[in-house]
Amino acid sequence: MTTAELLRKRIADRRAQTDAPSLNLPPVLSPVTPLVIPPVLPLSNHLSDLCCSIASMSPDQLDALDVGVIQCTDSGKILFYNKAQAEFAKRSPEDVQGQNFFTEVAICCSNPLFYGAFKRGISTEDLDIEFNYAFTFRVKPTLVRVRLYRDASTRTNWILIKPL
């Protein structure tokens, strides 16, 4: 047996010993297993295609989309909130206009995954990331696909939200 094979066997043996057999849980649910965040999935074509033209769309065109669209400043202040997002979040565009998305409207997004990605993208002027997220504020927990995007030519920031 090679050294690498021996090491792999020892690691497997130790894992088997620490997998909480008294609770009879599978290893994934073991109390000693840390929470693992799933990897970022490939960018979805629908949201990617939308990013190419979103900055040039009129408010009426943005309201006609079946995707939640939020335009905000670098600090997160909401400049535009479309009808699809208003229906999804149960908040009218008039109520959220001028408020901070992360600290006043969607507090559940004020975390390293969502707000952290937004701030990193703003600071590097390279905001273009897509990920799955679960909204929990003001609505029942709902899984969505989120796209954070900064249009370089207009220097506008966009949050696109599509319920899954």
Image: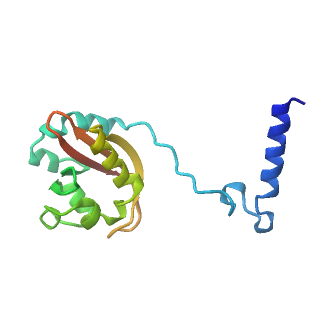
**Residue 122: % across, % down:** 27, 44
Query: Is 14 situated left or right of 55 in this image?
Result: right
Q: Which is more toward the observer, 149 or 140?
A: 149
**Residue 61: % across, % down:** 13, 44
Q: How many marks?
A: 0
Image point 30% across, 51% down: which residue?
161
Query: Is 105 situated left or right of 112 in this image?
Result: left
Quadrant where the N terminus sits is top right
Relative to 61, is 106 above or below? below
Image point 21% across, 50% down: which residue?
74
Q: Quadrant of residue 97?
A: bottom left
Relative to 20, is 66 above or below? above
Image point 69% across, 60% down: which residue?
32
Q: Which is more toward the observer, 44 or 22?
A: 22
Q: Residue furthest front?
A: 123
**Residue 54: % across, % down:** 18, 39
Relative to 141, is 14 above or below? above
Q: Quadrant of residue 47?
A: top left
Q: Residue furthest top?
A: 2
